[in-house]
Structure formats: C-alpha cells, structure tokens
Image (cartoon, rainbow, N blue to C red):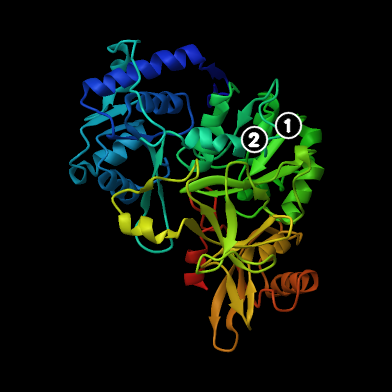
Amino acid sequence: MIEVGPDGAPVILTYGRLRDRSNRLAGALRSRGIRPGDRVAVLLQQGAAVPVAHAAIYKLGAVALPLASLFGADALAFRLADSGARALITGTSGAAKVAAIRDRLPALETVLSIHGPDGAAEGFEQALEAASPDFAPVDTTADDPALMIYTSGTTGPPKGALHGHRVLLGHLPGIVFPHGLFPQPGDRFWTPADWAWAGGLLNGLLPSLRYGVPVVARKFDKFDPEAAFALLAEHGIRNAFIPPTALRMLRAVPRPRERFRFAMRSLMSAGEALGEETAAWGREALGIPIDEAYGQTECNLVIGTCSALGIGRAGATGRALPGHDVAIIRQNGAPCEPGELGQIAVRRPDPVMFLGYWNNPAATAAKFVGDWMTTGDQAVTDPDGYITFVGRDDDVITSAGYRIGPGEIEDCLIRHPAVALAAAVGKPDALRTEIVKAFVVPKPGYEPSEALAADIQAFVRNHLSAHEYPREIAFRPDLPMTTTGKIIRRILRVEA
C-alpha cells in the first residue's frame, strides 16, 4: 500500500509489515478478551491501519464492522449498540464521537486510537508494540462470519448485512472482468470510495491486495476533482473504482489527459446507473472505456461489463458475471420476458450472498422469493442477457401510466451545458399520479432563473420525450448524498 499524506509524501506498507502488524493487533485484541464471533468496529479513513485492522480481525475469527468516518453520533451509536461491538479501532475524531455516546454502548470494552492514548481510548501503536509478531490464525470455514456492513433501506433502521469468509473470493470475478482481466503487470489501484463501504472495501482494497496489486490510499475530506487527477498522474495509478457521482464531478475538469498526463488502464463504476453521457465522456476525456458493475451490500458485484472481451452494450449495466445466477423476476418469482420491467434477483446459493441480517430473521426471510434474493431494483433484460438498470422500486416514477426511471432523465440533464449535477424524483400529482421534478446544481457562471429552468426543460423534452421531461425544476447548491456518493432521492421526494 502507498499511503499519501497531506503533504503528498508516500508511506509504504509492505506485505511483511502488514503480516507483522496484523499479527500483533490480533494478539492485542485477543489479550483484551476478543474471541471468534465478536464484532470489532473499524472507524477510520483510508490509510494503512485499515487493512491491518481487517487482517487482524479475520485472523482472530472475529467479525469486522467497518463504519464510515462521516457518521455522526446517532448513526454510530445505533450501529455499535445493535451489533454489540466489543472493540473499536479509530482515530482522534472517532474516539471523541464515541466518548460522547459511551454510556449507550455497554458492550464496548476496548477502544484503540491510531493517534495515541486519548481519555478512555488506548494507544493503537502501544498495544501493537506490547504484542507478539507471531499469531496462528483461527481455522475458519467459508460460511463463518467475517464481515458485517450496515445498509440503510428506505424504511426502518439500518440492517447489518453479515458476510462469511467466502465473500472476498466470491468478489474476484467482479474485479477481474470489469478491470480488463485484472491483474496485469504494473497495475496499481485507487478508489475515492470510503473503505467502510462495500464498494471501497470489496470493489477495491481487499481484492487488490489479494492479487498483489499495490493500493494507493489518500484521505479526501471532500472529493476534489483536480486533486484526484493529480493523484492519478503522480502515483502512476492504472486502475480505479470511481462511483458515477464522482465521475460526473470529474467532468468539470477541462482537458484532463493533456493537463495531468495520467495513464490509466481500467476504470470501473458502480453504485448508481452510469448513463450514456458519462460513459461517452470517459472514452473521450480519459481515453479508456468505463466498465460498469452492479451489486448490493447483501450480494455485491453480480452484474458487469468487460470491454476487454467486448462484453458491453450502450445503456446496459452488463450481464451476469461468472459465478452468479441473475434474473429479472416478477413479484411471484417467475422470470420476466425480455423487455419486461421486473426486479433484479440473484439465486442462492451465491458466493457473495450475505449470511443474513444481524439479529433480524424476519427481514432476512422477506428478502427472498423462494431461492431468489430480491434487490428492490427495477430493470429489463434483452434476449442476449444484457440487463439495463431502471431504478429503485421507490425511485421509479409513475406518470400518466408511464413507468419512468430517473437515471435516463438525470443522464440527459447533465448534458445541458449549465447543469453540474441533477436528480429526478416523482412529485404527487392529482392528474398524472406523479410528475417528474428535477433538482439541479448549476455549473459555476450560471445563475438560477425561470429562463434557465425553461431552457433545461426544453432540452430534456427535445432529447427524450414529452412524458419524461421535468415539469418542475428546483435549483440547489448541492444534492443530499450518502457517504458512498449516492443521491438520497427520498429526501428530495419530501422536498418535492
């Protein structure tokens, strides 16, 4: 791993040092009472301590609980309490957040801070120094719990998606194919995605290390497109996983190849629909195709494209990746006909499928129709097996009898020269059931006005159709986002 500090200077983590430090941490955690099956939370930004923590937890037979550094006190309190986490590895900021809620966390006994002793937090480095570099990993099976990531639904509190040790090996086809038959000599990986998210952890960090590909780590408190391009060039990054929202932000940087002279080999995007406009920009501005992938926290990287093998189709998310049985199904579990709108589903058993929701068997059972794990995502398939994502069940807009996916509208909106970011939602309407309402972040130099809104509406009407154009437009300085860079449309629906 190459950890890039605030001053730009790199610090190297070798595999030997990763082994030594993770063995020491595993021993330190065991000496503090952590046993197989116990949950150990990791609340850290990108950096060398993250793979050390994960490797130690897996060696110990415990369960890693990654938590996003952007989480506030209530979000942390719920996840730490619900999981019954007994230990936490964090830094100064995380330790301060947890100190304020410690009385709500009776199971939490150990807090280690990478920035040294701090109140009730012990020093991470001091704990490692006192531990042995030798540790015999617990003999675990493929289905023993290893990792739990909380996922937020549209209703109810977040649920802990519990995964077995097989989850990393199951992800490898989802990395190999969208990354141009990864790995290749000279590959070097980076993602701006938080490593607490399935995308950052399982679409990037762990598979790269599994294949011996160096990973660049860089803490971004806020995604900076110019700094991202500079990082690609300065550190010879050849492979990246960049979610669609970040790619759209990169579009604002003019002539990136000419200015930064990076040399990328593969680029994968997932988390939301990429859109044809962003895909076309990637080919022109970056000089490589953007391969797309699809999955959920519960069952990740099951659909994808592989430009290196000519597997891809304009507008489509891809085909089922090797090792996965994916279909578009009706509510009763029957497969849809080509072109028929239905729900993306994955048949069990599957190598990346979760073991279940933590302490929530009812929610686990509700996730399945027979042996099909449902996703809540609407899509259509063509006769060749290409799947086109339409939108979340609750994001699909019903207007005058039409079912409209927000992705196509948003893709069209960002083609307008004044639009930096956009989101489309359904607004209740007595006549049409719903109308399309767009929330638009204008580019610098463009002021919100009725005239600009009318011009954007006409643009979409002319490029898509009369039933899909936004009948209302609201301008915003930004859009509500999850920590993973997805637009939170439910907040916008309330505003609509």
Residue at x-position 34% and y-position 15%: 136
How crowded is the residue under tag 2: few (<14 C-alpha within 10 Å), some, or many (20+)? many
The N terminus appears in which quarter of the rendering?
A: top right
Can residue 125 be seen by looking at this rendering?
A: no
> In screen coordinates, is 123 left or right of 252?
left
In the rendering, at what x and y percent does residue 383 appear?
73, 60
> In screen coordinates, is 102 left or right of 348?
left
> In screen coordinates, is 441 left or right of 309?
left
Q: Secondary structure at mark 2?
A: strand
Which of the two discs, 2 and 1, labels the residue nearer the N terminus?
2
Can residue 184 be seen by looking at this rendering?
A: yes
Residue at x-position 42% and y-position 42%: 68
Give the residue number, with chain letter if any, for mark 2. 240
Q: CA distance from mark 2 to mark 1?
A: 8 Å
In the rendering, at what x and y percent does residue 432 appear?
60, 85
- The picture quadrant where one finds residue 445 is bottom right
Give the residue number, with chain letter if any, for mark 1. 264
Identified by mark 2, the residue type is Ala
- The answer to which of 217 and 443 lies nearer the viewer is 217
In the rendering, at what x and y percent does residue 407 appear?
65, 62
Identified by mark 1, the residue type is Met
- Circles 2 and 1 in contact, beta carbons < 8 Å: yes
